[in-house]
Image (tube, rainbow, N blue to C red):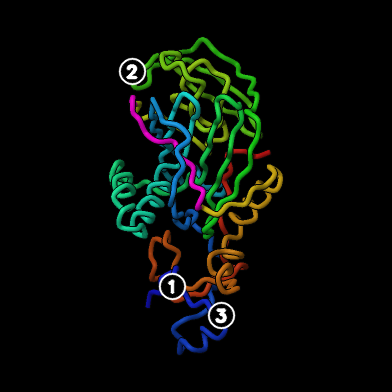
Amino acid sequence: MVINLCHAQRVMSAEDVIRSSGGRISFFEGIYRETRPQFVSWRLFNPVTLDESRIVVKYDVDIKLDSLSEQRVKDQVLTLIGPKMILSYGLWNWRESVSATAYYSKKDEKPYFDSLASEFGERPHGYVEMINWFVYRDLKQRNILNKHALPLRRNSIEYTESLPKMSWEIHQETKSILGYDCQKAEVDFRGRHWTVWFTPEVPVDCGLWKFSGLPGLIMEASSADGFYIFTAVSIENKVMKIQSYPKVETNRLTREMFRAMERAVYTNPISGGVFDQEKGQDYMIGAHITVEDPKDTDTKIFTTNTYLGLYFPMELE
């Protein structure tokens, strides 16, 4: 008996569910560590266009899940570079939200979101939704809007900061990536040491995530602890709209509050999640969508004490 996560019982207590199941459902014994976060698709209605890209860069991202294992997963990041703004975001998290928006759109709006969803096709085999951030860099104001999705939440969190100052050490080493001559640089930034390869042949200020202060596009970036490896897989001269999504409910926070809230949600995603938001439920019935064998867990109840999330922030301090 598989109980869909999004249609789990939200009214009865966990004990009531177990009693009413006739023995088919029981509490999960032990501790379950999720294999990746589960994001709820945003509804991207009424987007506001802020700029249009001139260059679009796609990166593969190789991510180590946690310090307790060597398991790695892959996602992709898209960077849209315009004359006024640069936007970097998790491609497949955004793509799933676009598809959901198309599904729920009015008849006259549906073709637009369908066209966005079809532009990048289906997610490649072996890639999952891991990158939760949307980083908007305003080139004129020299500030950054950080907007993050959270596991099992319909809303987002965000904060704005001035463009961070990064003290790069540029080396003479070079190599070729996608046919571009690239140069090596290193920086310590908020708890991680990064090694990057950038190309002056594409004279934009870094482009990837919130990295800034280099005279060229970053083609590869890796953290010294091995948690993140970004590699450019395509560069196109392409016009895409750089948009914000005012219909996505968001909590505007200070950076300190933002980081505390994100950590709390990632490490304990059930508490305050989509179930708790709707009916005060602090448990989840059935298999998490990332469980390799749902039969192992589809008749179990997870609680905040037995279900642990992963937390792997880009910034450690």
Whole-percent x and y of residue 120?
31, 41
Q: Which residue is mark 2?
A: 179
Whole-percent x and y of residue 209?
52, 33
Q: Nearer the viewer, mark 1 or mark 3?
A: 1
Q: Which mark is residue 291?
A: none
* Chain-order first, disc 1 or disc 3: 1
Whole-percent x and y of residue 91?
41, 42
Q: In the picture, which quadrant includes the N terminus? A: bottom left
State the separation of the CA atoms marked 2 and 1.
Answer: 49 Å
User: How busy is the neighbourhood of tag 2: few (under 14 within 10 Å), some, or many (20 plus)?
Assistant: few
Q: Which residue is mark 1?
A: 7
Q: In the picture, which quadrant includes the C terminus? A: top right
Please name the residue shown 57% across and 35% down the image. Answer: 225
Q: Which residue is mark 3?
A: 14
Please name the residue shown 34% across and 58% down the image. Answer: 106
- Of residues 268 and 54, the one nearer the viewer is 54
Where are the magenta residues, as a range?
236-247
Tell me, yes or no, whether the highlighted magenta stretch contains residue 246. yes
Say which element carries label 1. Answer: helix
Res 70 visible:
no
Q: Which amino acid lies under the numbered mark 3 shown in the image of this protein? A: Ala
Say which element carries label 3. Answer: helix
